[in-house]
Image (cartoon, grey):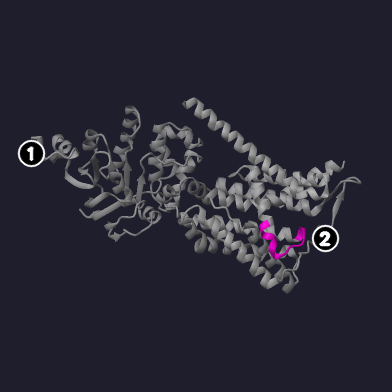
Amino acid sequence: MTWVAAVVHGILLGGYYALLAAGLALMFGVMRIINLAHGSLALVGAYMAFLLVEHTGWSTYLTLLPVLPGALIVGYLLQRTMLERSLRAGQLVPLLTTFGLLIVIANLLQEFFSPDVHSLDAGRIGTAAWQISSELSIPWFDVLTLGIALAVLGGLQLVLRFTQLGRELRATAADADTAELLGVNARAVYARATAIAVAVAALAGVFYGMRSGFDPSQGGAELLYAFEAVVIGGIGSLWGTLGGGIVLGVSQEIGAQINPEYFAIGGHVVFLAVLVARSASQASRIRYALRRFA
Amino acid sequence: MSALLAVEGLDVRHGLLQAVREVSLDVAEGETLALVGANGAGKSTLLRAIAGAHRPAAGRIVFAGRDITRMPAHRRARAGIALVPEGRRLFPELTVEENLRVATASRRPGPWTVEEVLEAFPLLEPLRRKRAASLSGGEQQATAIGRALMTNPRLLLLDEVSLGLAPVVVEGVYRSLATLIESGTTIILVEQDLARAMRVADRVICMLEGRVVLEGLRGQLTREQVTGAYFGLRQGATA
């Protein structure tokens, strides 16, 4: 039964990872940018919610109303002022830019909020749970997180599929020069993609803050989990990201079940196994092609 | 006739290679101009520079009285210039209909809608929900032309629309073009097939090594003159 509990909790945890990874996957899919500051931007969302709660006494959920539009604007400006220029200088430069951003954000947060651990109040949902059996209880908050992740991924999928912005995003991702020839302002499309990605990151950050304590140095660790979810799920697919998040969550919970210290390593092992399996199948495909050629 | 497009002393470079050298030309509203010339003569580069896909090194491009030399490609599309690029360049993962709808980004209302395009190219009607990557060459070309038309262009640039297509398919493409030409759309087309170019165009310009070497109205040029210019032979030598 404890193993069943581990799998159930892993699936629920996967919802959080998918939420965290969605923006990363979107930016990579559209612009081929690996945003190393993604976890840090999520953290900024959590701190902004914290600031609002401190000053207004609002519930954490209510702070999303100003935080998400704020994040949209930050994402748009981030693209127009920094990433756009980096992108013009080649594929590697955005990696450096966003790495720099990660460090700047961590230090700024430390400066303003101290290195102490902060947390956000999740309200009554934060402590309530369904007690299924003596071994298995399902926290409401985790279900809510998974629900939000499904809604966000489903919403993004609908936008990509059925709206003009979605068509422009997919067209620009495939061939930006040709999209331009049809009147698509590729830079504006990129900026909108980043705006959405940063807003979803901030949403994930606020949920992270309600799930556990956070401090300014955590951006990198969160990024790593998001990155693993994207890679496991297969790059470029939103539902794959959900699958990747769930696989990651389940591996971590199963690792923790074997030994509580194996939580993170469980995820890393599966991530590495997927990487090795992918490159092995790639290598065999290349060998096969070479043999046919010879 | 007033010039819809005026190109003045245009130089376009690909790195060290100068693909277009001091080219000047005018296109009047409603005119059909054919650009002919050997491979590497600079025809495609000239079209791409007019559409905004290449920044010229020198010279000016004036469209409908406005200097558009420094204007980015998407704003030129919104001003009414559409290019059907060489190799069609469809978005492979998008369906035929989605490919067409992307072009509504040009925000130019006009006679061309998805329904109108599908009516003009009936072969696309049953394919509208198919991914562009799964289409045959002729179907892709029809989609590419339809997609450019969706921007309701004042000036349509066609780059090698018959390249790689079966002759019977090329006939179909040119039949649709004939209707476009009759409807008064201004067209510049790059065409390898000299006879065909001289049949559909009001005026022919022949390029050689980046320069305009011969220009004339359809009736004024003989096939020998054009082939002479095409291969860089002196006029005297051909006679």
Where does the image place residue A70, in percent across and percent down from the top left?
A: 61, 65
> Which quadrant is the N terminus of chain A positioned in?
top right
Q: Where is residue A265 in the image (x, y as percent from the top left)?
A: 74, 47
The percent coordinates of residue A241 (x first, y second) are: 65, 46
Q: In this view, does A134 lie to the left or right of B33?
A: right
Looking at the image, residue B101 sits to the left or right of residue A138; the answer is left
Residue at 66% over, 48% down: A228
Residue A36 percent location from the top left of the image = 60, 56
- Could you say which is closer to the camera, residue A136 or residue A248? A248
In-image side of A181 versus A59 (left or right): left
Secondary structure character of the magenta stretch overall:
helix
> Which residue carries the number 2 mark?
A124
Q: Quadrant of residue B147?
A: top left
Circle number at residue A165: none
Q: Which amino acid does label 2 sit on?
A: Arg
Above or below residue B214? Residue A73 is below
Tell me if B15 is positioned left or right of A35 in this view.
left
* Residue A163 appearing in the image: no
- Indicate the secondary structure of the residue bearing disc 1: helix
Residue at the right extreme? A134
Residue at 25% x, 34% y: name it.
B193
Chain letter, disc 2 residue: A
Q: In this picture, is A76 found above or below B128?
A: below
The span picked out in magenta is A210-220
Q: Mark 1 points at which residue?
A: B236
Q: Which amino acid does label 1 sit on?
A: Gly
- Label 2, secondary structure: give it: helix
